[in-house]
Image (spheres, grey):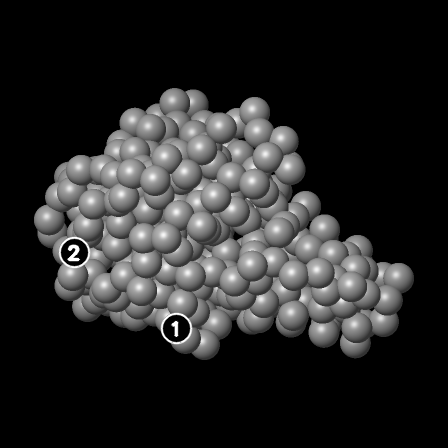
Amino acid sequence: MYIASSVWQGATASLETILHLVNDARIHAVETRGLHFDSRFLAPTEPAPSTVNLFLLVEGRAQVDARWYDTPCYFAVGPDEFERREPAARAFRFEGEPRRSIEVCLGVDRLHASLGLTHGAHPLPESVTRAARSLFDRELSQEARVERASMLIAALAEHRLCTLPVDVDDGERGASLQRVVSSFVALFRNQDKSAYGKVLADLAQVSVRQATRDVSTLYRRFRLPGSSPRELFRVLRLRRVTLFLSAQDESLEDVARAVGYSGLDAMSRALRDAGLPPPGEIRRRLRGE
């Protein structure tokens, strides 16, 4: 299991994310304060084939297809409702101080929960809730974090929400993958916008062909959205934009700088290119104005 993390601290809002990469899946733990998430403003991307997303909300509250749910709860969404989001698709929203949620990205054949927002949200079993909450302990060592993530995987399987594969030792292939994962972990920490070039530069001790092959393996194995680091970090940046626009004490220019754009015009252009509304409109709609 590989682990990457990223932290952002604004004037009165914050975002902390921890990404666990396991065989054929990923587990993304997210904690926010002073921020709201709304899937209507997702930047669409192309997910890995047959990929779906299971959401566990352990603190905060969720609005799923216009109905509000208290935590802890869970629901599963298909590609057209999330990664490859279509404008007319059903939507969901997260709020809470703090809001702690976990996204499990996996193959549809490994999901046992009802798929689609039309089914609404369901109460999260106590043992799954307990295991999920344990991932948000900031004092965990790397080894302990792997153990806690494994406990969550076991609890999800026990309650037939999903079945994730057990990690295996890949030997030499694993060592090759480790090189590209190490580069990816550093990029994820900083959400770097020139991601693809830096991955290849960090892998300069191998051929470009080998580095490209390793990057492709990274994306297939862990079901990362998009087809390259450049596309992944473009999408992650846009998703951060729509989160940070809900912050009360961040100007539009502050948001642009926080996610690495040269200014408000560049951020507005990126949103427009992704088929999303202008930043001011997104802010008003996130705040219900």
**Residue at x 51%, y 39% (from the top left corner):** 148
Which disc is residue 120 wearing?
2
Instruction: In this rendered view, identify the residue nearer to me: 72 or 60.
Output: 72
Q: CA distance from mark 1 to mark 2?
A: 20 Å
Which disc is residue 168 wearing?
none
The amino acid sitting under disc 1 is: Asp
Say whether residue 44 is left or right of residue 141. Answer: left
Q: Secondary structure at mark 1?
A: helix
The amino acid sitting under disc 2 is: Gly
Please determine whether, in this image, residue 18 is positioned above or below residue 278.
above
Q: Quadrant of residue 143?
A: top right
Which x, y percent locates residue 167?
Answer: 61, 58
Which x, y percent locates residue 68?
Answer: 13, 44
Please determine whether, in this image, residue 11 is positioned above or below residue 213.
above
Total tally of numbered discs in the picture: 2
Q: Residue furthest front?
A: 158
1 vs 2, front mark? 1
Which x, y percent locates residue 183?
Answer: 72, 52
Q: Residue furthest right?
A: 205
Q: Secondary structure at mark 2?
A: loop
Name the residue tied to disc 1. 109
**Residue at x 39%, y 48% (from the top left corner):** 155
Labels 1 and 2: the sequence-earlier one: 1
- Alpha-carbon neighbours of circle 1 within 10 Å: few (<14), some, or many (≥20)? few
Instruction: In this rendered view, identify the residue nearer to me: 159 or 184.
Output: 159
Residue 107 appears anywhere in the view:
yes
Residue 272 appears anywhere in the view:
no
